[in-house]
Image: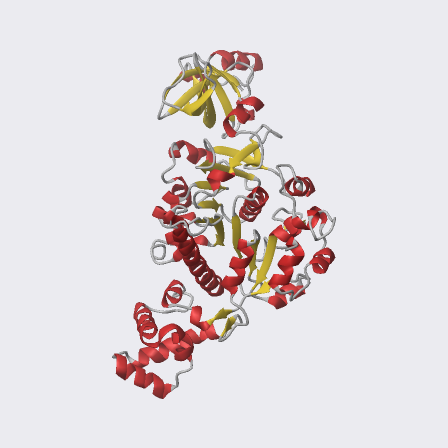
């Protein structure tokens, strides 16, 4: 791409006249270019394209019978233009990157961006600069996300169904685990991240899961051990939720799934107040006489209590809800996280929204409470700070809708901006369903194709140059293209994502950046490469039912 600046403004972008011989058909919205001003280079993005006639009659005269005349008119009377938005200014004398506060002069030269330009803006791949893809029309030139900045705030991955949200999530999880900068807890609704699953392209080939890639750095928890066995996977821990862990707040979150009304929710808070921590188990085991006595003593409506009990029996039928679980799931999760491992909780066949929302809310609330206590102790100098924790949730609009975000633990975490070293990675196909206030707190957004206007508006809320980026977002391919914008990148960037294949597996598991190798490839687990760890290897190294303390000794030699 070559051209010159014709006109424009700082807020509205710049118009570029393409040089004769340049083919506008080959220039894509989202492409990078550089404007060479007098003292600064302006790293810019193509946001729109246009054809203009010096003489308006040129558009209407028919020249189809004479190709030569057509070419002459096209070269002299028709102007091919692109609109660009300067994103970053580079002071050539000081080689310093700075925000754009001015525009280049008239007739400044515009050229396509080069490899050194991209590296200057986004950095080179290393332990904390994670290579996620390449700019449009610049294959094999890496664009990096700053993982240190990425984990500083909650983030979002958005796109309509079938555009690769799972793929982008896998990619970012791999980068974070590789870096060692944080721990990760994934609420894996469809069992797509822990062990291998179907890729999202037309081939339906298998994509390796985090356990296969990182071995002992990842623990698999499950709500459904039968589903795990059917897939030939031996989980590290089976999660059971005691009745006493379920609070009124948890029921309020799933009121739609339980078909409750506001009156029923008020009754639930009354039950918890009078019956204490075991309110749910006690209430579900009340007979008609006990319900009548409770109604008389508290002024509650007997019929409302009976109707509520029938609806709450739906919880009793969830197989992972137990009166006295053998072990505490939260304690186990914290033990694994504290040991430097990452936890993926698979739901198996228990993937209803009722089960997903209930379990995610209960576990996250208790884990967050522990992180708050630890952070407060750290401030008092009695213990070290927590390693940052990133919690991954799918169907995020269910947890973060305008009605729910102020009542749930997830809305609180999003607004805290890592106050207690806990952040969210929210994944959703309906970003418009998420509270606008939560959107404003998301540091970085990875956005695939969206077609609904309200979804586009929601992801661009609070983003600079939102009007121009709208065209970019609407022009994305349905697969392997996304726009990244926000805290972890110096400017919005459209990328073609790197491929999740054998080459990626080898790169993500090798020890490039000082000690990122899986323990199974370098420690007590043997000499097998984690990139080729088989199910048989895994079963041999981590037998089912192994007690945690013994397991830790085996893995770490302690």
Q: Can you give x and y, in whole percent of width and height, for residue 529 in the image?
A: 72, 47
At a point 57% along the width and 60% down the height, the residue shown is 346
Q: Can you give x and y, in whole percent of width and height, for residue 151 in the image?
A: 47, 43
105 to the left or right of 509: left
Q: Nearer the viewer, residue 444 or 339?
A: 339
Q: Nearer the viewer, residue 105 or 209?
A: 209
Eyeballing the image, is 104 above or below 241?
above
At a point 39% along the width and 79% down the height, the residue shown is 283
Q: Quadrant where the C terminus lies?
A: bottom right
Q: Is residue 235 visible?
A: no
At a point 73% along the width and 56% down the height, the residue shown is 537
Q: Quadrant where the N terminus lies?
A: top right
At a point 47% along the width and 60% down the height, the residue shown is 360
Eyeballing the image, is 160 above or below 47?
below
How many marks the image carries: the answer is 0
Eyeballing the image, is 185 above or below 494?
below
314 to the left or right of 291: right
């Amino acid at each position: 791409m070559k051209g010159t600046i014709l006109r424009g403004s700082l807020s509205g972008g710049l118009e570029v006249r393409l040089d004769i011989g340049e083919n506008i058909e080959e220039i894509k919205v989202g492409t990078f270019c550089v404007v060479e001003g007098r003292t600064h280079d302006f790293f810019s993005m193509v946001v729109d394209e246009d054809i203009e006639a010096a003489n308006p009659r040129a558009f209407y005269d028919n020249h189809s019978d004479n190709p030569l005349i057509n070419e002459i008119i096209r070269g002299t009377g028709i102007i091919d233009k692109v609109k660009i938005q300067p994103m970053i200014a580079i002071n050539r004398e000081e080689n310093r990157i700075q925000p754009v506060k001015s525009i280049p002069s008239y007739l400044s030269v515009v050229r396509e961006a080069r490899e050194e330009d991209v590296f200057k803006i986004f950095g080179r791949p290393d332990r904390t600069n994670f290579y996620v893809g390449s700019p449009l029309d610049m294959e094999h030139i890496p664009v990096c996300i700053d993982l240190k900045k990425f984990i500083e705030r909650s983030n979002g991955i958005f796109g309509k169904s079938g555009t690769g949200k799972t793929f982008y999530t896998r990619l970012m999880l791999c980068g974070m685990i590789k870096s060692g900068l944080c721990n990760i807890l994934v609420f894996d609704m469809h069992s797509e991240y822990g062990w291998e699953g179907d890729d999202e392209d037309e081939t339906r080939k298998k994509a390796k899961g985090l356990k296969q890639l990182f071995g002992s750095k990842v623990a698999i928890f499950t709500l459904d051990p039968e589903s795990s066995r059917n897939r030939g996977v031996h989980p590290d821990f089976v999660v059971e939720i005691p009745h006493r862990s379920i609070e009124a707040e948890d029921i309020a979150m799933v009121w739609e799934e339980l078909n409750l009304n506001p009156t029923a929710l008020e009754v639930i808070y009354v039950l918890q107040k009078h019956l204490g921590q075991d309110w749910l188990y006690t209430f579900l085991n009340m007979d008609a006489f006990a319900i009548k006595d409770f109604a008389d003593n508290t002024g509650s409506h007997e019929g409302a209590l009976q109707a509520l009990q029938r609806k709450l029996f739906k919880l009793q039928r969830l197989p992972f809800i137990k009166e006295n679980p053998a072990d505490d799931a939260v304690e186990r999760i914290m033990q694994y996280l504290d040991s430097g491992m990452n936890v993926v909780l698979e739901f198996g066949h228990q993937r209803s929204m009722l089960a997903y929302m209930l379990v995610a809310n209960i576990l996250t609330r208790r884990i967050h409470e522990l992180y708050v206590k630890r952070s407060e102790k750290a401030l008092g100098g009695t213990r070290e700070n927590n390693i940052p924790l990133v919690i991954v949730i799918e169907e995020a609009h269910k947890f973060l809708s305008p009605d729910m975000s102020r009542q749930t633990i997830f809305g609180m975490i999003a607004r805290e901006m890592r106050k207690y070293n806990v952040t969210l990675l929210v994944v959703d196909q309906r970003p418009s369903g998420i509270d606008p206030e939560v959107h404003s707190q998301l540091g970085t957004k990875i956005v695939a194709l969206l077609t609904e206007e309200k979804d586009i508006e929601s992801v661009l809320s609070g983003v600079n140059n939102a009007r121009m980026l709208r065209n970019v977002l609407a022009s994305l391919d349905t697969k392997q293209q996304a726009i990244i914008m926000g805290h972890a990148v110096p400017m919005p960037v459209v990328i073609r994502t790197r491929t999740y294949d054998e080459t990626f597996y080898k790169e993500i598991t090798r020890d490039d950046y000082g000690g990122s190798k899986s323990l199974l490839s370098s420690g007590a687990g043997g000499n097998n490469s984690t990139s080729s760890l088989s199910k048989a290897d895994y079963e041999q190294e981590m037998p089912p039912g192994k007690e945690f303390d013994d397991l830790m000794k085996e893995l770490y030699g302690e």
